[in-house]
Amino acid sequence: MAAESNCNVCVVLPASGSGHRMCISTPKQYCKILDKPLLLFSIEAFHKLKWVKRIVVTVDKSHHEFVTGLMREHSLDKVSVVTGGVTRHRSIYAGIKALANFCLPSDVVLLHDAVRPLAEADVIKDVTVAAKKHGAAGVVRPLVSTVISVDEDGYLKESLDRSRYRASEMPQGFQYQVIKSAYEKCTDYDLDYGTECLHLAQMYTGTKSRILAGPDTLWKVTQRKDLYAAEGVLKERITHTAVVGCSDKSLISELSNHFSENFMQISFAKTLANVSVCATDVVHFQNVSDESCCKGLMLPVPEIMSHLRSINTSSLMLTPVLVHVNMYGEEFDVYEQQTNLQKQLATVINECTENMYLSAVIAKVSGDQHRLCELLKVMIRERSWALSGQVMVT
């Protein structure tokens, strides 16, 4: 990125809110999605960018030790945890002051809510470049609903033309001197009741903000239903799906079309060499008996897992591994097959990274293919930890 050569880029993530609108006892930023606290997704989205030099997360005092331990556990060494304030603006100000000995006046500071887990690298870069050039920048989205005002008696007073207005989203970026000066000049009313940082920069420093159109992934987790939406989007975005040992081309084709992104098939052939891996590659393992694999007597599960771990380079990637043992209609002992596979899974399941699933299906080609395909779709889509390590027979 052009901005990285001549300035530091830092991030402040306010995460000290109580999440009272969620109506649950756990603040929303600590609610788990895919077995990880929500704020981790937001932090990792910035931490993986090499040109981001420092991240300050502001938390309430009671969670300071917990979040600090979370950063150590996940090796997030660019993150500093500081105690925030009782309002959003006071928390952001605490983060800005924490950068006083790190940032030069012209460096860029990005502000982003910890409960916005879908920050995209291109959007972050565009805001950073615009903030460096103009002093302040932010992203917006079109309004979905019409905005009205109501009089003191509860009657409609005014309806705004929504085509003239936009919803302000995050991230927002500022030159450090701009945002620091704006907060230093804020009144207590601003700090207690204000919400728009771009407006503060304009009001107290005269800096006009560059406004960029943002994608529809910039929404904020606010209500309980948003947790389910975030989980669904994250599952689709950060997951690689591998179907292993299945030779039924029609079944693979249907699954590949249904899960068009990040889908791969792993098959077995003694005569074919390994190939480089991308989302749609067919990956072959050498020195494996075709006959044994087809009958489900042997699958190189440890080798498969080692291979998948080698391509699982992103801390956000979730890799469910689905083993489909195609029996080609031959007679077999279901209990024996299930036991053998269970043993194989058991040898590697404890070695799996925390973001990897592994499950198996034993099926006959003469079975109900539609039912089998629907089962596989559900397993891939749900990615339930309860199914990890399990063997199902159909």
Image: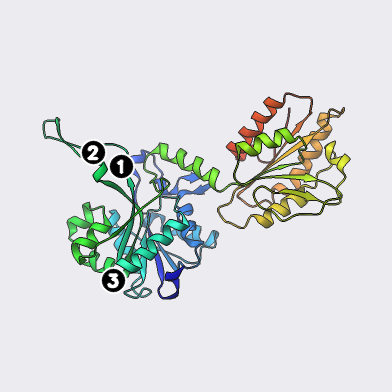
**Along the line of sight, the residue nearer the viewer: 61 or 282:** 282
Q: Secondary structure at mark 2?
A: loop
Q: Residues within 10 Å of mark 3 (few under 14, many from 20)?
A: some
Q: Answer with left or right where residue 75 lies relative to residue 123.
A: right
Give me the C-alpha separation between circle 2 and circle 3: 34 Å
Percent x, y for residue 132? Answer: 35, 68
Kind of residue at badge 3: Gln
Kind of residue at badge 2: Val
Question: Mark 3 and mark 1 in contact (Cβ < 8 Å)?
Answer: no
Kind of residue at badge 1: Leu
Percent x, y for residue 43? Answer: 46, 57
* Camera sees residue 21: yes
The colour scheme is: rainbow
Tally the numbered discs: 3
Question: Mark 1 and mark 2 in contact (Cβ < 8 Å)?
Answer: yes
Looking at the figure, which quarter contains the C terminus? top right
Q: Secondary structure at mark 1?
A: loop
Q: Which residue is mark 3?
A: 177
Q: Which residue is mark 2?
A: 147
Q: Is residue 59 above or below residue 264?
A: below
Give me the C-alpha separation between circle 1 and circle 3: 31 Å
**Along the line of sight, the residue nearer the viewer: 20 or 1:** 1
In percent of the image, x 70 and y 47: which residue is there? 349
Identify the mark at residue 129; answer none if there is no mark.
none
Question: Mark 3 and mark 2 in contact (Cβ < 8 Å)?
Answer: no
Percent x, y for residue 325? Answer: 78, 36
Q: Which residue is mark 1?
A: 143
Q: Secondary structure at mark 3?
A: helix
Of labels 1 and 3, the one closer to you: 1
The mark nearer the N terminus, 2 or 3, is 2
**Along the line of sight, the residue nearer the viewer: 290 or 83:** 290
